[in-house]
Amino acid sequence: MMRTHYCGQVTETLENQNVTISGWVHRRRDHGGVIFIDLRDREGLVQVVVNPDDAEKFAKAEKVRSEYVLTVQGKVCGRTDGTINPKMATGKIEIVADSIEILSTSAPIPFQLDDKVISEEIRLTYRFLDLRRDEMQQVLRTRFDVTRTMRRFLDDNGFMDIETPILTKSTPEGARDYLVPSRTHQNKFFALPQSPQLFKQLLMMSGFDRYYQITRCFRDEDLRADRQPEFTQLDIETSFMTEPEVMGYMEKLTKKIFGEVGDIHFTEDFPQITYADAIRDYGIDRPDLRIDMKLVDVADLLQNIDFKVFAAPAKDPKGRVAALRVPQGAKMTRKEIDDYTKFVSIYGAKGLAYIKVNDLSAGIEGLQSPIVKFFPDQVMAIMERVGAEDGDIVFFGADKAKIVNEALGALRCKIGEDLDMFTKEWAPVWVVDFPMFEVIDEETGALTAIHHPFTQPKATTQEILVHKNPEDMLSMAYDMVINGLEVGGGSVRIHDTDMQAAVLKMLGISDEEAQEKFGFLLNALKYGCPPHAGMAFGLDRLVMILAKRDSIRDVIAFPKTQSAACMLTEAPGLVANDQLEDLALRFRKPVKDAK
RNA sequence: GGAGUAGUAGCUCAGCUGGUUAGAGUACCUGCCUGUCACGCAGGGUGUCGAGGGUUCGAGUCCCUUCUAUUCCGCCA
């Protein structure tokens, strides 16, 4: 027998019993006449004592090194006063070894498991060792707790887990697809799913009412701390449910996950904010509501001043002039302001004007700023509108609305973080009333769907077709945002052939293309489609915030690097020529060399 | 595609304005040690300074190119 108990579970309740434990040597302390071995398994550590009463056993203990794998048989003994280790869960006892078996030796490992800093490059190259670290063991356990809670909730509420294909069809719009060449259909390709979107809609048409799946999705786009080329979604779809009903279920599920896994209890309904309000107040469609600051429009006050930097965007219908008041920010140094100026330049902002509020009662004399001289008559009205108080600093953004929103929106979070302006630990919010379309080409007016082309607009089919400003049309889409992170999104889907055709038409997708790319869906719509709606949660992101990590790489067992490579397996790799021949593929010059 | 940061011993890092034989902690190896728990003590080995090129009497240090990791912009319904 190799194990009667997990190392971490041998406690004083087992005193005087004989146990067999197996695990890794976490540390060995050799005192010459007695050897201590901390043995580790997934449940924790326990101290093994090896006495020199048996030469063979002792010789083995002397040979043992870190990360050897052992089976130890011995008696659980209470420790005497003074040798108890209160830092260990098993510190009141130790196992006095009767026998030791070395199951596997280990070369010295490239880093120590309790090193506080290890470069990510090394961690990912030796991920199997990195995952031995307690931190990573905990994170993966949290991840499992989350999926288990999800499954329980959904099972209890009549949802069915149904699998959908991984080898599927490339669809237009959206992200770049990962492609898989077909051997049996040469020169044709499968695509890995960006999400099971169309399949889950088809399942609704098949009558499976309430579906869920914890499934992998693939998008061949550049990576970020919260974006991997393959990531996991909790995918959900329901039939015959209204928008509020679906959102209600999703909110309940979310509360359950946070409650059970994180001991974080959201007692109130998640607030809802419209997309338009989110952009106006926070400059972004996934506001971090832990920070109280808001953007304030001041364009109307500045249209007729001589200061072109402000006046021009103030008059431009596509421009925006907004202020961000930072309470007690006037103590910022010149260098800090310069750094923030540099920060907003990332988003295309050409500058970052500011006014330090030293003494409001002194009027304009009490303001310190390089720009007040350009609009002395308006400045006090602006101070009043933003609610300025002594000791504040007010930043200004003036440009195209998109630039102002992104720059001040990002600045808001950055300053909130730098000055530790968080007013609460958790801030969930629903963002609703997304626009249906977005203009992607100013010249041609070409549209793209903000959510996806199967989202139901808040309009009739007729209205869709004759809408003069399609970019003003709203959709029945909703995002769940927690602490400024989009953790999930969904929508009510189109369940009517004509409406779907109308939306595709607005998107400039021809009948032929629509037929070729998702004719199967359009066809299915003809045969009795229930009203349906759903949502997808980003599992990695949920786990990331629950585990308080800054990157989803930390909550994925084997993640990819920023260049979408796996440091452990060295994927992607070359393949044999035969394999290419089977697929009727051959190399051409890499795009880089061809230039 | 673009901007920033980093790359020196197995690991984490120091190495200033260019100057002799590149250091520290830790790991590792050897010896000693019967109560440690990051055990202790003594001793020991150690490097393609990411790679390539250049400037210089001389480059870890300066310049150029490049690779890798990472953060962000673009991109990601």
Image (cartoon, coloured by chain):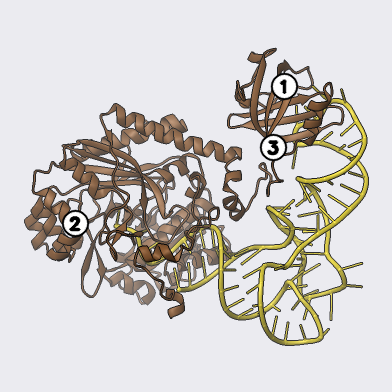
Chain colours: A brown, B yellow
Q: Residue at x 32, y 71 (%)?
A: A313
Q: Is residue A341 above or below residue A166?
A: below
Near mark 3 (Cα within 10 A), the count class, few <14, some 14-19 or many ≥20, is: many
Per the image, the residue denoted by label 2 is A518
Q: Which mark is residue A204?
A: none
Amino acid beneath label 1? Glu
Looking at marks 3 and 1 on the same chain, the residue that comes earlier in the sequence is marked by 3
Q: Chain of mark 2?
A: A
Q: Quadrant of residue A512?
A: bottom left
Near mark 1 (Cα within 10 A), the count class, few <14, some 14-19 or many ≥20, is: many
Asked which secondary structure carries label 2, the reply is helix
Look at discs 3 and 1 and give the one toward the viewer. Answer: 3
Q: Which quadrant does the N terminus of chain A fall into?
A: top right
Looking at marks 1 and 2 on the same chain, the residue that comes earlier in the sequence is marked by 1
Outermost residue toward the top in this view: A16
Q: Chain of mark 3?
A: A
Residue A541 in view here: yes
Would you say A324 lies left or right of A17 here? Answer: left
Per the image, the residue denoted by label 1 is A94
Q: Residue at x 50, y 38 (%)?
A: A140
Q: Which mark is residue A68?
A: 3
Q: Residue at x 76, y 24 (%)?
A: A49
Look at discs 2 and 3 and give the one toward the viewer. Answer: 3
Q: CA distance from mark 1 to mark 2?
A: 65 Å
Front residue of this view, candidates A478 and A410: A478
What is the x, y in percent for residue A307? 38, 75
Both marks 2 and 3 on one chain: yes
Would you say A406 lies left or right of A184 here? Answer: right
Amino acid beneath label 2? Phe
Q: Residue at x 51, y 63 (%)?
A: A340
Looking at marks 2 and 3 on the same chain, the residue that comes earlier in the sequence is marked by 3
